[in-house]
Image: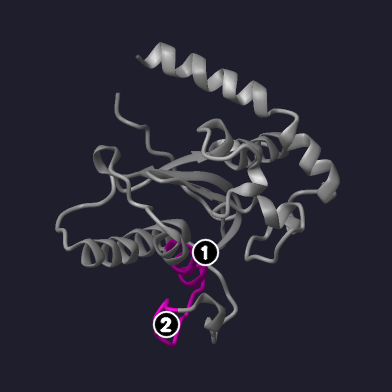
Amino acid sequence: MPFRRVQIVNGCFYHIFNRSISGYQIFNDYSEYNRFLSIMKYYRFSGLKKRYSFCNSDELDISAGKTKVDILSYCIMPTHYHMTLFQNEDNGIEKYICSVQKSYSLYFNQRHKRKGPLWESRFKAVAVKSNEQLVHLTRYQHLNPVTAFLVSKPEDWKYSSYKEYIELEHGFCDFVKYINMTPDVYKVFVEDQIDYQRDLNKIKNLVLD
């Protein structure tokens, strides 16, 4: 069954996600994960006047402060990504995700000397309809690496926004504008559900197989 498209409007949150074509592993090492993160940071801005090489994300210099989207949370996995985005301007999410995916595809194909599409589809979007749904979505994303047994604790995964939430590192997410939880409370909220989410994943895999 094809994924149902939703209308994306300003002032709303969306779960945005996509995976690689045929389950191909498109994030293989620190350089590739870090490149995607640098691209994510750069393209959220509108009215960019200066090209950026992406070589060092710490050198990012943005001349315009307005953003197409607010990034509430994210998790990058070996074959796919998840983001929670808030749209600030017309077609902001569309423009943002298309730029991110195109830029990473060009980088990846050049690095691996390959040709052809990298992503399974344009991207998928699900509207977030309540504050409760929003905070549960961030937890789901932050637990993805634990559910997949890539790490035992969500803070051990370097390529999600979880460590920003619990104040272990500085990042670029806008969660403090929207999530009214202290870091300690959020940490308990997430980590209390590790076993439950893993069990759900086992059931899902049995059903799908």
Residue 46 painted magenta: yes
Tell me the kind of residue under disc 2: Tyr
Q: Residue 183 location in percent, x, y?
A: 81, 50
Q: Which label is found at residue 89?
A: 1
Q: Residue 81 location in percent, x, y?
A: 45, 47
Q: Circle 2 sits on which residue?
A: 52
Looking at the image, is mark 1 or mark 2 nearer the viewer? 2
Name, please, the residue furthest toward the left: 115
Q: Residue 48 location in percent, x, y?
A: 46, 81
- The residue that appears at 57% across and 40% down in the rendered structure is 151
Residue 136 painted magenta: no
Residue bounds of the magenta highlight:
36-55
Secondary structure category for the residue under label 2: loop
- The residue that appears at 55% across and 55% down in the rendered structure is 10
- Name the magenta segment's main secondary structure: loop
Q: CB of mark 1 within 8 Å of CB of mark 2?
A: no
Secondary structure category for the residue under label 1: loop
Q: Residue 173: which quarter of the image?
A: bottom right
